Image (cartoon, rainbow, N blue to C red):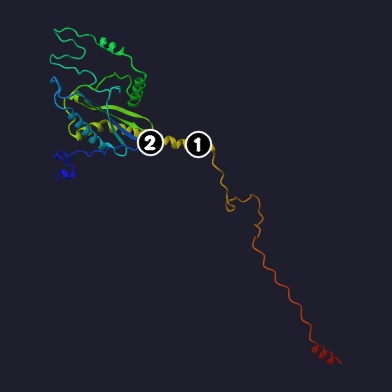
Amino acid sequence: MLKSKGLQTLDDLDGPEEDPLLKLQPHHSLVFIVELCEAQRPSKLGSLKGSHEKYLDELSRLEQTVELLRGDGAVEVIRWEPGMPVVPSSSSSMPQQTGGAVMAGATPSGGRRSRPQSAGVSRAASRPQSAAAGSQNARLRAYLGVADPSERLAPRIGAFEVSYKLVNTQSGQQYGPVEIFSKIRTGTWPGSPSLLLKRVHEQLQGFLQIDMGAGMLFQHAQALAKEAKADARGAKPVLQSAADLPDDAGNDAPAPDLAPAPAAQPAAAPAEPPPAAAMEEERGGTE
């Protein structure tokens, strides 16, 4: 009964109500970048165990999970390939370890100091790169918003590194990238879909709030600009009707009577002459 109402434990009864999550709008694109190990498994020497199909299955499961974030926008999953910039993550540098193990930049006690890193870097930097590869990397850097990435020739062994970034396709504004999972760092797989989505929302909701707020400000600025442009042109004069015209001051003469004049009566017809017999009687009487 509790699960049917969205309650998993009794603690959810007293928990605060959560605000509804913001979703992607039509002008949003959520891009996930996955660095996936491509080493042969199991290896010939037996150092790498498992199978490569496991990595592909986890990638497919990731694609199905992040599809739930589509909303009204777009979701895309990109596999990291050589030549693409390295997405900054917690696993990009060697983690420090304790308990007598080697720490990044430290020399083990009683051991011989390792060769300085500059030697390997200078040797790799001396290799010429083609102009086409350089221009392609430049475009990818601009697309992913990563400056001066360190080149990597292949995905790292054991890598299943997941990052994402939010892109506003209208303004070109980008937020991220943000790492949400690292198999190199944790030594495990991503886990349940709900846990992965929770990691995404931790910063995605803030990105959406910032982007939507900026969009509202932009629309408000556009409305103000249109109003200012209309004021600069000047409003067109409005013609007044005769009834709204003001009376002339100082004119005391009554208003002329504009009633229509009565129609003229038709003229009377002339009297007919008396008949001849009547004239004879009048003449006889007089004699």
Give the labeled residue for mark 2: 216
Position of residue 106 relative to residue 252, above or below, is: above
Q: Residues within 10 Å of mark 1 (few under 14, many from 20)?
A: few
Residue 218 versus residue 29: which sits nearer the camera?
29
Count of numbered tags: 2
Direction right: furthest residue: 287
Secondary structure of the residue carrying tag 2 is helix
Image quarter where the C terminus lies is bottom right
Q: Residues within 10 Å of mark 2 (few under 14, many from 20)?
A: few
Secondary structure of the residue carrying tag 1 is helix
Amino acid at pointer 1 = Lys
Residue 272 x %, y %? 77, 81
Q: CA distance from mark 2 to mark 1?
A: 20 Å
Residue 111 versus residue 248: which sits nearer the camera?
111
Direction front: furthest residue: 44
Residue 233 versus residue 131: which sits nearer the camera?
131
Residue 152 x %, y %? 27, 19
In the image, 249: left or right of 10? right
Give the labeled residue for mark 1: 229
- Residue 139's image quarter? top left
Residue 200 x %, y %? 25, 32
Residue 201 x %, y %? 25, 33
Amino acid at pointer 2 = Met
Q: Residue at coordinates 36% horizontally, 29% vertically from top-left?
A: 173
Are the residues flagged by discs 2 and 1 in contact, CB closer than 8 Å?
no
- Residue 260's image quarter? bottom right
